Amino acid sequence: MTRYLKVALMGSGYAGKSTLIRLLTDKTEKLQVNYQPTAGMDCGTITLDGSTKVSLVEMGGQSHFEFMWADLMKGSRMVVVVTESNPKAVLKTRQLLQKYKKDIDGIQIIAIANKQDLPGSMKPESVQDLLGVPTYGMVAIDPKQRLNGYKLILNGLKDLIQVAA
């Protein structure tokens, strides 16, 4: 029997949410370095353990799409907060977490400190200290990071997958 779980990706514009979805859904030919903002939302599906399908739903990061975020997070079993790894972006991400605290209360949350390859990037441990949620470093434009991304999602959902098994 196939199980379906929803994972929401949230974060500011330009953080790499769409790129992360493309990386995980094997759309590597579409990985791009040039920024194209998401209009509203983006989504993709991955299969984790042969019987668990995970719908990844990304919420457009521009402030004029934030009014949809609470609705798009409903039904999510996990929220992946994606942030650029520079100090200004991390502080903005911390504000977003505080702003949506009531919408994500009780949901498993992890953070991706993306763009670890750029100069001035904060280490994932420092980002975690500021955000207060488990944080993992990544370079979402690197196809070699796909397995790492799967493991992060799988580990975040492992209790739910085991309960459903």
Image (cartoon, helix red, strand yellow):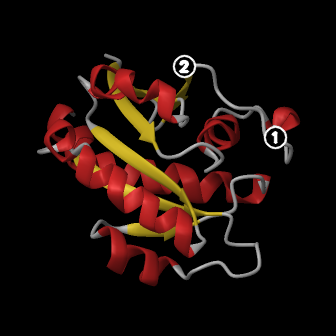
Which disc is residue 146 wearing?
A: none
Up-down relation of residue 11 to residue 72 (above or below): below
Up-down relation of residue 131 to residue 109 (above or below): below
Q: Amino acid at mark 2?
A: Gly
The crowding category of the residue bearing disc 2, from other C-alpha atoms within 10 Å (few below 14, some 14 to 19, many at least 20), is some
Q: Residue at x 26, y 47 (%)?
A: 99
Instruction: Give me the C-alpha separation between circle 2 and circle 1.
Output: 19 Å
* Residue 67 can be seen in this image: yes
Q: Residue at x 72, y 34 (%)?
A: 26
Disc 2 versus disc 1: nearer the observer? 2
The x, y position of residue 54, in whole percent, is 43, 29
The x, y position of residue 107, in whole percent, is 19, 43
Q: Quadrant of residue 87?
A: bottom right
Residue closer to the observer: 56 or 116 = 116
Q: Residue at x 76, y 80 (%)?
A: 119
Which disc is residue 31 wearing?
A: 1
Up-down relation of residue 138 to residue 18 (above or below): below
* Residue 58 can be seen in this image: no
SS for tag 2? loop
The x, y position of residue 79, in whole percent, is 34, 43
Q: Residue furthest front?
A: 64
Quarter in which the C terminus is drawn: top left
Q: What residue sits right under mark 2 in the picture?
A: 40
